Amino acid sequence: MSAEPINDLSRLCVHTITTKPWPIEVAAEQFAKAGVGGITVWRDALANRNIAQTGQLLRDHNLSVVSLCRGGFFPHTDAAGRQAAIDDNRRALDEAAELGAPHVVLVCGAAPGQPLTESRKQIQDGIAALLPHAEAVGVKLAIEPLHPMYADNRSAINTLAQANDMAEELASTHVGVAVDVYHLWWDPTLEAEIARCGRNGHLYAFHICDWKTPTLDFLNDRGLMGEGCIDIRQIRSWVEATGFTDFNEVEIFSNRYWSEDQAQFLEKIKHAYLNHS
Amino acid sequence: MSAEPINDLSRLCVHTITTKPWPIEVAAEQFAKAGVGGITVWRDALANRNIAQTGQLLRDHNLSVVSLCRGGFFPHTDAAGRQAAIDDNRRALDEAAELGAPHVVLVCGAAPGQPLTESRKQIQDGIAALLPHAEAVGVKLAIEPLHPMYADNRSAINTLAQANDMAEELASTHVGVAVDVYHLWWDPTLEAEIARCGRNGHLYAFHICDWKTPTLDFLNDRGLMGEGCIDIRQIRSWVEATGFTDFNEVEIFSNRYWSEDQAQFLEKIKHAYLNHS
């Protein structure tokens, strides 16, 4: 089974970090001109801005505000660090509400100085502590499992099964998951776990890019769709089989692409999206 | 639960690649002098040697020959490539028999140009094709799951659950698994899957090293035990709970350590083994 080809850009969302050299105002203008339908905003792009006005600016460009990236990083070996993380996530929820983003994506964190089991408990406790505020401001939290190569210090949640388990245990209308092909493509249980979060109403976001061979950097060498070995169309078919009709979000960290002309890069994104997603 | 501390070097095995700058004859002499109990031989260390005589040399130094590394790399997009891989694995089995190694460790391979499901099928078919020869020469095959960051081109087998599934499906007295903490430490199902392969008599080998934060290279920046975030002692406790009494094999790929004096590095290995394994 494979998904239908994509014929238009209405469900294309681009993350501000994908075109990192552009300030958000330039990104908004360029995305709109290119026909992109949505934008996911990274918090650094909001620095020194009025957040509500920036959200209005995005909507004035007919861009849907898809997500705010990112909260998380709950685990710390000391209680003060854990409390600071919860406070920061509360601010992220406020920022998402001001911006008009329906959810905050969580890169959950990990502390290399403690067992993964302890980090996982701290993540779940941290999210639980945020739930009253999430409900109060009407913003949801999306647990994003990260590739196991980030288990040391970026996320102790490394499979969609773990994220689904946690979302089910938290049992809140305001907690779900984000599926990113880069982190999860290798997992033999992926199709079943996508179906599972779809059934539960927990599938909040779908991120795409590609895994290049060779990959030269742990963080910033992601590929454009079609440049690597991920069968994005097949994974998209699993996502859409759940009834998901939200955006396909292009999230690429790439020293190579960030050094290029960003307008030309955006054209490449459109081409890759239409032909390899 | 944690394992008992290690008080002697009798179950310490070092891979020839760990001290790559040393020719195998030097490694044998140095390992023996240091009190190391076993050696796992990488095939490149046997180049231009009489293999049977080299095996005898190792035993003359009171070194147990623990494994031959490595066979595998079964998946290819063309049939000729797949046949060449099977032929090469047959030679690896012959070399292990000549050397006196009880098993060949399999890095199973992956072809980025085809789906992981197809690569996994080719791996299973490749191992099945080898079984008559493995039985004939009396050498076993150990499926080693590799970290998901190697799923593009090194191994489509990325969890111990997958390796266990495959070993069970092949249902041979000559197929089991190798557990390497570097590849598997992040997996929340690891304890259960180690117990499973132990129950089935499929646990053939146990490899140790550590995951450093940050890790600077995808291949050659592994840490000495204690330098990273892996709770090796806990994983060893799970391995030993199955009744495993074979060697703890130190397998470190490290540009940093390979550039050091290897005798000093071997002393560091002994210290790390006794204090952090």
Image (spheres, coloured by chain):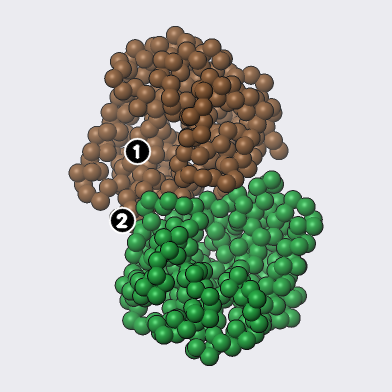
Chain colours: A brown, B green
Where in the figure is residue B149, as x and y percent of width and height? 52, 51
SS category of the residue bearing label 2: loop
Q: What's the amino acid at mark 2?
A: Gln
- Residue named by callout 1: A72
* Side (left or right) of B107 relative to B188: right
Q: Which residue lies furthest to the right in this view?
A: B80
- Whether residue A108 is visible here, answered yes or no, is yes
* Side (left or right) of A259 relative to B166: left
- Residue named by callout 2: A114
- Which chain is disc 1 placed on? A
Give the crowd class for mark 2: few <14, some 14-19, many >=20 residues within 10 Å. some
Q: Kindly indicate the quadrant of the structure image that contains residue A68.
A: top left
Q: Which residue lies furthest to the left in this view?
A: A80
**Does label 2 lie on the same chain as label 1?**
yes
Residue at image position (64%, 57%) is B109
- Whether residue B189 is visible here, answered yes or no, is no
Q: What's the amino acid at mark 1?
A: Gly
